[in-house]
Image (cartoon, rainbow, N blue to C red):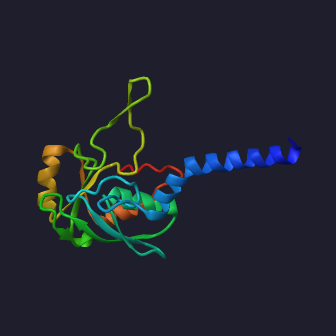
Amino acid sequence: MTKRQIVLIAALVVCTAVTVVAGPRLWRWAAGPPAGYCPICLRQEHKESMVKFQAEGEPVTHACCLSCALTYGRQAHKKVTILSVTDHNSGKELAPEHAAFVVGSDVSPCTHTMRHMGVEKQEYPVRWDRCLPSILAFPSAPAAEGFRAQHGGRVRTLQELLQKVASSDPIDLSLRF
């Protein structure tokens, strides 16, 4: 065999391996998430925490939760406009400027658990997740306060949430309200 044939065979083997490994991933990336999944974090959407938002220069998008949408804006360095949120109790769409939000309660529809199982079968605490802290919407401050009394967290307005996101360090991706 000549040196040229060896190089061509090696190139063919590498191209085949790359196609086999990367092909399905590229297809999923190009096709987007299946219906019912958040296009940002690829988790299943939850009817009690859905958010409709628009990032600067992008089309209107539905996300699984407000934390996911706000984190996306910070990571993409784009201004995010929240168009609608979903009432956690009824699943009905709400105007975000009139809603009250409970941040950081013990209810988190997207993450379910605050622990991660490692390869060694040992649990590790979650240090960061794009859908944390949970931000749940309610139609009024009294409804949010009633939920907060049972599940913890803090009651905030949309303006307070957006101010916190705008004033936070872009390097520190955690949202600490």
154 to 1, vertically: above or below:
below
Q: Residue 69 appears at what percent x and percent y? A: 38, 61
- Where residue 79 appears, as percent x and y from the top left, is 45, 70
- Residue 166: tell me if it is visible: no
- The N terminus lies in quadrant: top right
Q: Please give the name of the residue rendered at 41% of the width and 59% of the height, measured from the top-left corner.
A: 40
Q: Quadrant of residue 55?
A: bottom left
Badge count: 0
Q: Nearer the viewer, residue 31 or 113?
A: 31
Q: Is residue 132 above or below residue 114?
A: below
Say which of 56 and 123 sits in front.
123
Residue sitting at 14 percent across and 51 percent down? 147
Residue in the image at 78% along x and 49% along y = 8
Q: In this view of the protein, can residue 101 be seen by the observer? A: yes
Q: Is residue 159 left or right of residue 105?
A: right
Instruction: Give above or below for 146 relative to 78.
Output: above
In this orientation, which residue lies closer to the viewer: 53 or 140?
Answer: 53
Up the image or down, 66 lies above or below 15; here it is below
Q: Residue at x 75, y 44 (%)?
A: 10
Residue in front for this viewpoint, 98 or 49? 49
Q: Farthest residue in the right direction?
A: 2
Indicate the position of residue 42 as horizontal and vertical percent values.
Answer: 38, 54
Residue 176, image x and y in percent? 38, 49
